[in-house]
Image (tube, rainbow, N blue to C red):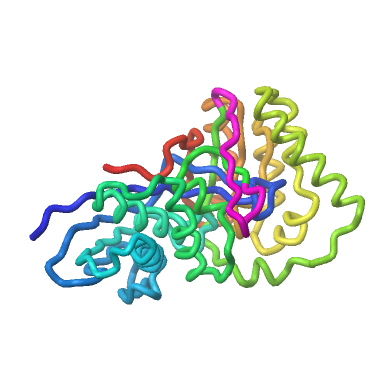
């Protein structure tokens, strides 16, 4: 058997309250691992999948990691090269934490590393976005970009993949809870109205601008004041049991802000330091546990590396 390389790509929080489809950040964990190795059989194949409970296809063009890697190979003229992928899912499906994005990012990164980096990380982004599109039908980078590149990422234009990493204040922590309830991405998009009032537009643009200024100036109070979603969160909150109870508890515990991670049901909060982040996590857990809903908690700095070679 040929020796291989292993890549890890982390979970991510998309939207970040005020940046629907244009903001996202990476977590330290959980994430997915993919092993890539050369094969004597021509073409790309997926030979092993673990942790997916039979939910992921082995067909390359129907699998997020496989599709992303295949498109990258076609781009560099190596589609005939014999390569095997092993996919090890180590994060929950349907959690709002960018599971498909992590697989797509890890897939392109693993094959690129195996081929001794014909492309830069940034050049891998279009192929990773195409891979995630297989899962949710939308061409957007707010999960894929942070999972691949790391950090807090602003996507000025998804169509052009005009992507920019933002400055982060020292000490900023994320607390994310995944309640074990089902929220389908198609349902979370279906509840959204395509009508936004002028007042909502003014508030939301002020908040995203304030959030970015707060990041660059390390103005923690401004970050907190700006993490107010007046458009998406009010429409989606009803899909997540006890959302507002969690939010109230989190803000009382000292979080800067709290909202829905991606399409949900996960809920994230940002805090000024690890001590507050842990206290916020206890508050989140208490609400769901008291209501007999199983949950998983993740506390993390903002992951600055994104996908990495292990």
Apparent side of residue 190 relative to residue 175 in the rendered image (left or right): right
Q: Which residues are magenta?
A: 155-171
Residue under the image location 25 percent in, 52 percent down: 115
**Towards the viewer: 132 or 274:** 132
Residue under the image location 61 percent in, 31 percent down: 271
Apparent side of residue 125 relative to residue 157 in the rendered image (left or right): left
Instruction: Give the answer, above or below, for where 58 lies relative to 39.
Output: below
96 in the magenta segment: no
Apparent side of residue 101 relative to residue 227 in the rendered image (left or right): left
Instruction: Give the answer, above or below, for where 55 lies relative to 291.
Output: below
Across and down, in percent, residue 52 comes to 34, 66
* Residue 282 visible to the viewer: no
Apparent side of residue 190 relative to residue 10 in the rendered image (left or right): right
Tally the marks.
0
**Residue situated furthest front in the rendering:** 77
Instruction: Give the answer, above or below, for where 299 lies relative to 142.
Output: above
Residue under the image location 19 percent in, 72 percent down: 42
User: Which quadrant does the C terminus fall into?
Assistant: top left
């Amino acid at each position: 058997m040929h020796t291989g390389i292993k890549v890890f790509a982390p979970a991510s929080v998309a939207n970040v309250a005020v940046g629907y489809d244009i903001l996202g950040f990476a977590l330290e964990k959980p994430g997915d691992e993919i092993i890539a190795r050369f094969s004597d059989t021509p073409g790309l194949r997926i030979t092993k999948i673990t942790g997916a409970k039979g939910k992921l296809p082995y067909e390359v063009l129907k699998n997020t990691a496989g599709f992303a890697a295949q498109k990258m190979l076609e781009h560099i003229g190596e589609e005939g090269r014999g390569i095997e992928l092993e996919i090890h899912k180590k994060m929950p499906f349907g959690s709002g934490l960018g599971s498909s994005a992590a697989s797509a990012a890890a897939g392109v990164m693993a094959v690129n590393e195996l081929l001794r980096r014909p492309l830069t990380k940034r050049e891998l982004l279009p192929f990773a976005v195409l891979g995630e599109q297989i899962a949710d039908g939308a061409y957007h980078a707010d999960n894929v970009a942070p999972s691949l590149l790391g950090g807090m990422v602003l996507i000025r234009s998804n169509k052009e993949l005009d992507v920019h990493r933002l400055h982060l204040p020292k000490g900023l922590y994320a607390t994310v809870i995944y309640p074990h309830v089902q929220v389908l991405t198609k349902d979370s998009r279906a509840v959204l109205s395509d009508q936004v009032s002028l007042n909502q537009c003014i508030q939301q643009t002020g908040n995203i601008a304030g959030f970015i200024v707060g990041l660059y100036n390390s103005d923690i109070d401004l970050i907190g004041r700006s993490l107010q979603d007046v458009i998406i969160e009010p429409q989606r909150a009803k899909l997540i049991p006890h959302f507002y109870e969690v939010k109230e508890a989190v803000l009382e515990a000292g979080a800067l802000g709290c909202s829905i991670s991606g399409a949900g049901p996960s809920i994230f909060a940002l805090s000024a330091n690890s001590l507050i982040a842990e206290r916020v996590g206890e508050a989140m857990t208490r609400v769901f546990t008291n209501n007999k809903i199983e949950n998983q908690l993740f506390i993390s700095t903002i992951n600055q590396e994104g996908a990495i070679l292990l």
